[in-house]
Amino acid sequence: MGFRFFRNDGGAMSKLLIDKHSHHVQPVETWQHALSNVVTDPIELCQLLDLNPTQVFSAKKATDQFPLRVPRSFIERMKKGDPNDPLLAQVLPLGVEMSDVAGFSDDPLQEQAVNPVPGLLHKYHGRVLITLTGACAIHCRYCFRRHFPYPDNTNRQHHWARLCDYISSDRCIEEVILSGGDPLVLKDHHLAAFIAELEKIPHLKRLRIHTRLPIVIPERITDHFIDLLKATRLRVVVVIHCNHANEIDESVILKLESLANSNIMLLNQSVLLKGVNDHSDALINLSQTLFRANVLPYYLHMLDPVSGAAHFQVSKEEALALMKKLKQNLPGYLVPRLVQEVPKELCKVSILE
Ligand SMILES: *Cc1c(COP(=O)(O)O)cnc(C)c1O
Ligand code: SF4
């Protein structure tokens, strides 16, 4: 990590370093600075939000298990003084995460069985999911990846040959999904080099990128990055991950607009989370706000039963009642599909009445 100099310096130091060395080193891009300058201390997070930090002391174990990590611009979208803010609830470690709950486990999706090459999951027909990095800009408490011991070497280029050999050998594979971790924490030259390898595989048609970066660090969507996506022969789909309309501010809308204007298809997936978006008003507002930003709702996921996340669970009955309200209040194209990931199933399973 070359950016550790820049952590917790309030911005002044990083400016100095960049100015001083600007003739010798590549300038650190704004988004890279935002990525290294994330808040990792729960007490600092509380102070930024005018909240009493005593509430987080009980959560030390939860923080040790899965550290707090949240970009500053995402914090700026939280409401000060509100301990129940829906954005805060997604990132704040709580003591309750450490209780064992029946049915919740460390690897609820049993993905080892569909992992033919390190960093590649081939679970569904015609598409493979690739993890180029285990790193994320933000740590979401409900994430099933919270227990994954990702090695730091997942983006080493010598793995790429094995990934591409696997894809080349199966002509049914038409789509590569970059997921993670978050693929957009990688720098453009890494992504471009990998996409160039993929382009050599004649049967590949689509490239899908699952990322939370356009939401949590919108500066990541640079003109250079957009040019990179425009240059590929593959049809590009970007699936963002947004759970609440408050996550979308004008800076996010502008960046999503630039992607949409470049013929990149934009979809959103959310997770249905108690205390975040388990109200029909919140979900309706989310769909409408996404549409304003050129994004169509794709999936609304039921929570994966990962240990530490049970307090986010919404029952199937409640979920179906919410879906009914969405269907009654929104055009069909703004209603996401309610799905659940089920081990060994050949697609995401729709939850229907
Ligand atoms: C979710 C997922 C996909 C993509 O499924 P879609 O229904 O096409 O969005 C692909 N592979 C894996 C392993 C997944 O979990
Ligand atoms: S993989 Fe996605 S949901 Fe999980 S911690 Fe990273 S950004 Fe959050």
Image: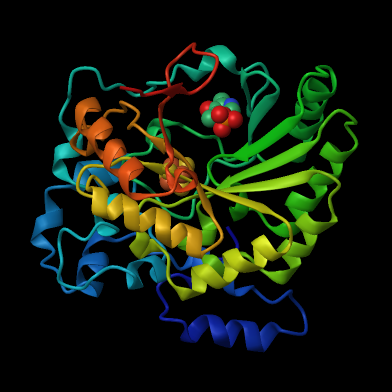
Please state the total of marks drawn on the protein image.
0
Front residue (pair 33, 23): 33
Rendering quadrant holding ligand 2: top left
Q: Which residue is drawn at 76% across and 55% down?
A: 229
Q: Decide if residue 314 is in sight here.
A: yes
Q: Residue at x 18, y 37 (%)?
A: 311
Q: Decide if residue 4 is in sight here.
A: no
300 on left or right of 256? left
- Please determine whether, in this image, residue 338 is positioned above or below residue 249: above
Looking at the rendering, which quadrant does residue 70 occupy? Answer: bottom left
Where residue 110 appears, as percent x and y from the top left, is 45, 16
- Please determine whether, in this image, residue 243 is positioned above or below residue 18: above
Viewport quadrant of the C terminus? top left
286 on left or right of 56? right
158 on left or right of 2? right
Where residue 147 appears, as percent x and y from the top left, is 38, 31
Viewport quadrant of the N terminus? bottom right
Front residue (pair 207, 105): 207
